[in-house]
Amino acid sequence: MDKFFNYYKTKTNKNTKINKYRKKNSGITLIALVVTIVILLILAGISIGALTGDNGIIDQAHTAKEDTEIASWEEQIDLAIIDAEKKHREPTLDDVKEELKNQGIIDDYSQVDKDGVITTNKPTYEIAGKLDDYIPFGPGKFATKNEEYTDKTSKEEYKTVTVPEGFQILPDESKIDEGLVIEDKSGSQFVWIPVSDINEMAQCSKAGGSCKLKLEGNELRCTTHTSTETESTKIYIVGKLYATSTGENKFGTVNTTYNPNSGFREPAVVTGSSSGTGTSYDGDTNNLSTIKENYTTEEFLKDLKAQYKEMATSVAKYKGFYVGRYELGLEGDTPVSQNASKNTSVKTADAGSSSLKNWYGLYKKCLEYKVPEISNSSITSTMIWGSQYDAMMNFMKRRGEESSITSTSNSSIQNNSYVTGKKETDVIKNVFDLYACHREWTLEAHSSGLRVYRGGNSGLSSSPSCRYSNNPTSADSIYSSRLTLYIK
């Protein structure tokens, strides 16, 4: 009995100790409680952020709702356009707007602006691009493809201008006779130079005054002279230049001769030799490497001939080309045609710049102009050809500016700075700095080692029609150039 009692007592004591231990360790400590609360707060914060933060669940739901509503509106607009096309063989913008109103997509015609952007009824969304096909192209509207614009008031023989994709016609400068101006989305501006007859600015290399160029399909050829088979006597398209000597402050005497290695001519290389085989200037690969690595004189001449023919073919087809309204400018390293006195981030390009060096650097930079936001542009840019400069002078002469293009400028007219666009009096038919700012190098060649430049610089009084020349390696800050554009 005692043994049993002692055994029971011992077992009870052990159980009591175990229970006491369990009671001691069964509660939550203060530290554990704090940690738990912190974790819960973090989880709550993450959850709230996922719900309400940027790109959170609520934000995504709101965006999805907007996208759904916009898609619904766009579908309704598409159906309204289809209905308008069913009712009208060739619906106008007014016809489409009427249908939008009839179907309750808009309450008032003013909800469609001049660019065709539709402001829907509540909830308010703006939807663009749906009505582009129904909006007639005109000044103030950017072309979404190559567009034709006709100025019926013009006295020029051809009154229609082709505006390239990515450009608009400036509303206040939309008259051909006064110098129609187009502008890209970066602010570069160009003036339309009409050329009713390609024979006014180009001829074939046999020349002599009797050439008759004609566009046959996409091929520009001389119908007077026939090309022979040998490369040395092969006929190609060349410039018809209005000059017999340098320094003439007059305009109108056309030089119909052509010699590939002497006199005024284009396209041509200058090698320092009358045979065309010299090793100076274009005959020096160190100079040509500024344009392209490992460029040879033969390749350069071949490219110039191809570029000139492509430009002349375009002029024959479209009846004109575009010239930079301002001298060549640089915004950073990007070539532009902008008023550098109004856009201080633009610097007027000059041959003395370490990045350009001379004529070769200016020529290369002129090839690099790109239409903003257009990946596959229909235009080609280049340094202005001498015959293009003459075509510009001829246009200004026809429009009553003969005295302006042949008179020597003075300080009250000319831009006596090196900032293009600085003086508003140095302008003819919307083209600035023809009297001065910089001397403007062209692609025209003279003699065996010279390139032609036009006009004067800030310290030289000269007429816009005047020609001078210098060797293309001259790295002088008085020299700049001017962009031209033609449609491919």
Image (cartoon, helix red, strand yellow):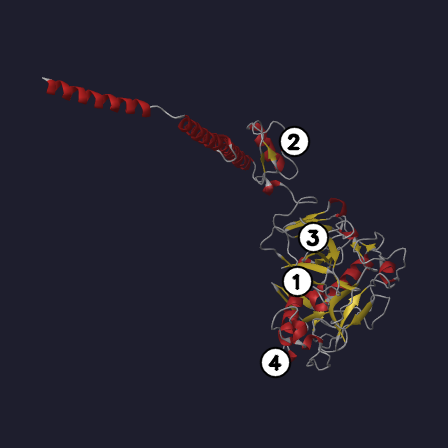
Image quarter of residue 223: bottom right
Looking at the rendered structure, the secondary structure element under dot 4 is loop
Q: Position of residue 202 (x, y in %)?
A: 72, 67
Dot 3 or dot 1, earlier in sequence:
3
Dot 1 or dot 4, earlier in sequence:
4
Query: Which amino acid type is marked by label 1?
Result: Leu
Looking at the rendered structure, the secondary structure element under dot 1 is helix
Dot 3 or dot 2, earlier in sequence:
2
The crowding category of the residue bearing disc 2, from other C-alpha atoms within 10 Å (few below 14, some 14 to 19, many at least 20), is few
Give the label on residue 230, or none. 4
Q: Is residue 246 visible?
A: yes
Query: Which amino acid type is marked by label 2?
Result: Ser
Dot 4 or dot 2, earlier in sequence:
2
Q: CA distance from mark 2 to mark 1?
A: 44 Å
Q: Is residue 44 left or right of residue 293?
A: left
Q: CA distance from mark 4 to mark 2?
A: 67 Å
Marks 3, 2: nearer the viewer: 2
The single residue placed furthest to the left in the displayed view is: 1
User: What residue is pinned by disc 3?
Assistant: 161
Q: CA distance from mark 3 to mark 2?
A: 30 Å
Q: Is residue 174 left or right of residue 86?
A: right
* Residue 45 vertical position relative to residue 306 in the rendered view, above or below: above
Q: Nearer the viewer, residue 22 or 215?
A: 22
User: What residue is pinned by disc 1?
Assistant: 367
